[in-house]
Amino acid sequence: MRRALLAITGLAASTTALVVLKGAPGTSQAAQDRPVAEAPVVPGGSAAPEPTPGGVTPSARPGASAKPSASAAASRTPGARTSATTRATTAAPRTTTSAPKVTTRTVTGPVVSYKYGSLQVRITLSGSRIVDATGLGMPLDGQSGLRSDDVQARYSGSSGEVVAKQSANLSTVSGATYTSTAYKQSLQAAIDKA
């Protein structure tokens, strides 16, 4: 029992000694990582002298010895600071996050058949916003072609009513009711898919 008590006491004493020696100024990780050009600041506001290669910093007072006295070394406790130097702290590196990249994708609605033919609508989205719309497979000839042109002019493109309203709730193009209705149906299905 006595041996175990002595072993535990010895272990505690050696751990304490390691902590005291490891916590000495100039040997901390922050002090080791500091560039040589950075000098620690003394509480008086002036820069402290550069550390010597042996790791001992000379005192800021002129004429003082470069080695700390035995009584000063013996009286140190973990976390205690000496008046001649302060510990340098290193700032955490800045991390900058860029804005999430907006993805552009294209969604095509189903083919909708109506009185004058069939059509489908393709929309382009940037994120969740519609940025372009176009009718595909619309009739090109005769009266049907003219109606298709009117619908395309009103609804499609990056400045059309689809982009302005961001929905399929569009006003009907006069004289092209069937084409407008088919366009809105395919558009609504494309929006639902997106």
Image: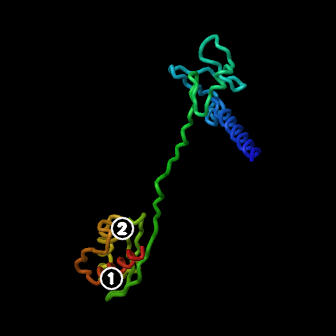
Q: Is residue 97 above or below residue 187?
A: above
Which of the image's four quarters has the C terminus?
A: bottom left
**Residue sitting at 64 percent across and 22 percent down?**
72
Outermost residue, left direction? 174
Image coordinates of residue 48 in percent, x first then y, are 58, 21
Q: Say above or below: 174 vs 71.
A: below
Q: Which label sits on residue 30?
A: none
Closer to us: 146 or 47? 47
Number of marks in picture: 2
Q: Amino acid at mark 2?
A: Gly
Amino acid type shown at disc 1: Ala
10 displayed left or right of 77? right
Marks 1 and 2 sit apart, C-alpha to C-alpha, by 17 Å
Instruction: Give the residue at mark 1.
Output: 182
* Depth order, front residue of 18/93: 18
- Front of the two marks 1 and 2: 1
Query: Which quadrant of the structure image shows residue 84?
Result: top right
Percent across and percent down for residue 190 are: 40, 76
Q: Nearer the viewer, residue 190 or 79?
A: 79
**x 63%, y 29%: residue:** 25
Residue 18 vs residue 121: left or right? right
The residue under the point 36% across, 65% down is: 158
* Marked residue nearer the N-terminal end (1 or 2): 2
Look at mark 2 in the image and give the residue it sits on.
157
Q: Residue furthest right?
A: 3
